[in-house]
Image (tube, rainbow, N blue to C red):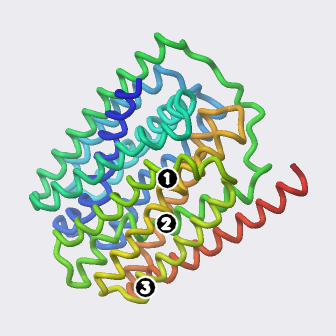
C-alpha cells in the first residue's frame, strides 16, 4: 500500500503541476485575457466546493464512485485539449475535470491517514511534491508547445487513474468498505476554523494562477521561474520528510504560525517583486505556508470529526475549492485592474485568516 500511495501522489501532483504552472500560460497563446484565465482557474476549485454538499445529502463516496471519478479525470484532461480554442467549452471541460479531481484526493487522503503514522504520512506524501517538481523542472527546460503541454496533462491523468484504481482495489481486499454516517456532520460548530482555511486558500489564488506570469513580467525567464517553483517544492519536500516531530505538538499553534508566515511571504513579493534573492527567500517559506500548514490542517480536521471521508471532502472543498475558486477569480480581477497590488491584497487576506484562527482557538477553549 505504501508504494501505491507514493506512486499515486507522484502522478496526481505531477498532474496538478502541469495544470497550475503551465496551462495558465498556454492560455495566453490562445489569446485569453487575464480575467478569463482567472475565471478558468476558478472553475475546477468551485466544483470541489460544491461536491461535499452533494455527497453529504445525496451520494455516498464509495469505491465505485471513486473509480468513476478516476475515469472522468482522464476524460476531462482529454477534453481540455480538445476544447481549449473556445472559452465556454473549455470552461465546461474544466468544471468536469475539477469535479472529478475533487472526489479523488479526499478518498485517498482518508486511506493514507487511516493506515499511516503521522511521521510516515509525510514521507509518503512528499512523493507528490517530487512529482510536482519533476514536472516543473522538465517542462520548464523543454519549453513545450501548448499542444504538448496538454498531452502531458493527459498522460499524468492516465497514471493517476491507474494508481488510484490499484489503491482502491487493494483497500477493498484488505479492509472492505465501511460507510460513514454523515447526518451529524456540522460546519457551524467550528465556523471560525473553516473560515480561516477558506481565507488561506483565497490568499493563494494569485500565487497559483499568476505567479508564473507575474515573475515573467518582472523580466525572469521561463527557466528561472521553473527554478523558483522547484526551489519552493524542494523546501516543501524537506519539511514533509522531517515534520513528524512537529506534528506531535499543538496543531492549532502550528496553523497560526504558518498563516502568519504566509502573510509575510506575500508581503515580500509585493514589496520586492524584481528581487530574485528575496523571491527565492519567499519561496523557501513554502515549506511552512504549504507543507506544514497542509499536513497540520488535514490532521486537525481528521481529529475533529468521526466522518473522515466527508471531513476531508469538506476540507478540500472549502479550502482548495471555494477558497481556490474565489481566490483565482479575485486574483484575476485584481491583476487585470491593479497588477502591482496583487500580493499586497493576498497578504491582507492571509492576515485575516490568522485572526479567524485566534477566534477559533478562543471559542474552542470556551465552548468545547
Vertical position of residue 239 compared to residue 128: above or below: below
Residue sitting farthest toward the right: 366
Q: Is residue 198 left or right of residue 139?
A: right
N-terminal-most mark, 1 or 3: 1
- Please name the residue shown 36% across and 66% down the image: 209
Marks 1/3: CA distance? 27 Å
Counting labels gives: 3
- Please name the residue shown 34% across and 53% down the image: 91
Marks 2/3: CA distance? 17 Å
N-terminal-most mark, 1 or 2: 1
Residue 327, which numbered label?
2
Q: Secondary structure at mark 1?
A: helix
* Circle 1 Cα neighbour tier, 10 Å, few/some/many (<14 / 14–19 / ≥20): many
Q: Quadrant of the N terminus?
A: top left
Marks 1/2: CA distance? 10 Å
Q: Mark 3 = which residue?
A: 270
N-terminal-most mark, 2 or 3: 3
* Circle 2 Cα neighbour tier, 10 Å, few/some/many (<14 / 14–19 / ≥20): many
Q: Secondary structure at mark 3?
A: helix
- Where does the image place residue 177, in percent across and percent down from the top left? 56, 16
| Disc 1 + disc 3, Cβ < 8 Å | no
- Where does the image place residue 100, in percent across and percent down from the top left? 41, 38
Front disc: 1 or 3: 3
Q: Is residue 83 left or right of residue 93?
A: left
Q: Mark 1 = which residue?
A: 46
- Please name the residue shown 47% across and 55% down the image: 291
- Where does the image place residue 148, in percent across and percent down from the top left? 11, 50
Amino acid at each position: 500500500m505504501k508504494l501505491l500511495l507514493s506512486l499515486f501522489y507522484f502522478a496526481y501532483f505531477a498532474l496538478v503541476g502541469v495544470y497550475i504552472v503551465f496551462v495558465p500560460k498556454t492560455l495566453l497563446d490562445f489569446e485569453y485575457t487575464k480575467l478569463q484565465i482567472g475565471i478558468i482557474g476558478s472553475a475546477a476549485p468551485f466544483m470541489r466546493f460544491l461536491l461535499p454538499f452533494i455527497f453529504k445529502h445525496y451520494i455516498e463516496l464509495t469505491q465505485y464512485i471513486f473509480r468513476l471519478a478516476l475515469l472522468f479525470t482522464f476524460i476531462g484532461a482529454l477534453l481540455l485539449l480538445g476544447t481549449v480554442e473556445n472559452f465556454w467549452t473549455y470552461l465546461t471541460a474544466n468544471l468536469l475535470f475539477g469535479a472529478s479531481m475533487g472526489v479523488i484526493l479526499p478518498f485517498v487522503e482518508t486511506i493514507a491517514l487511516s493506515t499511516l503514522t503521522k511521521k510516515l504520512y509525510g514521507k509518503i506524501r512528499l512523493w507528490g511534491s517530487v512529482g510536482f517538481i519533476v514536472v516543473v523542472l522538465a517542462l520548464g527546460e523543454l519549453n513545450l508547445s501548448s499542444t504538448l503541454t496538454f498531452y502531458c496533462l493527459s498522460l499524468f491523468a492516465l497514471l493517476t487513474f491507474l494508481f488510484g484504481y490499484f489503491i482502491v482495489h487493494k483497500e477493498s481486499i484488505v479492509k472492505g468498505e465501511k460507510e460513514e454516517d454523515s447526518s451529524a456532520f456540522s460546519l457551524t460548530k467550528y465556523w471560525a476554523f473553516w473560515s480561516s482555511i477558506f481565507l488561506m486558500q483565497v490568499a493563494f489564488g494569485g500565487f497559483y494562477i499568476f505567479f508564473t506570469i507575474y515573475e515573467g513580467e518582472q523580466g525572469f525567464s521561463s527557466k528561472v521561474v521553473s527554478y523558483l517553483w522547484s526551489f519552493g517544492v524542494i523546501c516543501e519536500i524537506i519539511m514533509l520528510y522531517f515534520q513528524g516531530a512537529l506534528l506531535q505538538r499543538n496543531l492549532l499553534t502550528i496553523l497560526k504560525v504558518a498563516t502568519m508566515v504566509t502573510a509575510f511571504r506575500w508581503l515580500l513579493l509585493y514589496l520586492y517583486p524584481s528581487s530574485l534573492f528575496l523571491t527565492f527567500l519567499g519561496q523557501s517559506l513554502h515549506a511552512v505556508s504549504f507543507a506544514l500548514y497542509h499536513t497540520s490542517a488535514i490532521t486537525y480536521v481528521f481529529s475533529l470529526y468521526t466522518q473522515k471521508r466527508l471531513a476531508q471532502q469538506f476540507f478540500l472543498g472549502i479550502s482548495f475549492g471555494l477558497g481556490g475558486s474565489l481566490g483565482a477569480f479575485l486574483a484575476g480581477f485584481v491583476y487585470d485592474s491593479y497588477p502591482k497590488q496583487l500580493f499586497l491584497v493576498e497578504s491582507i487576506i492571509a492576515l485575516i485568516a490568522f485572526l479567524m484562527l485566534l477566534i477559533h482557538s478562543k471559542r474552542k477553549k470556551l465552548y468545547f
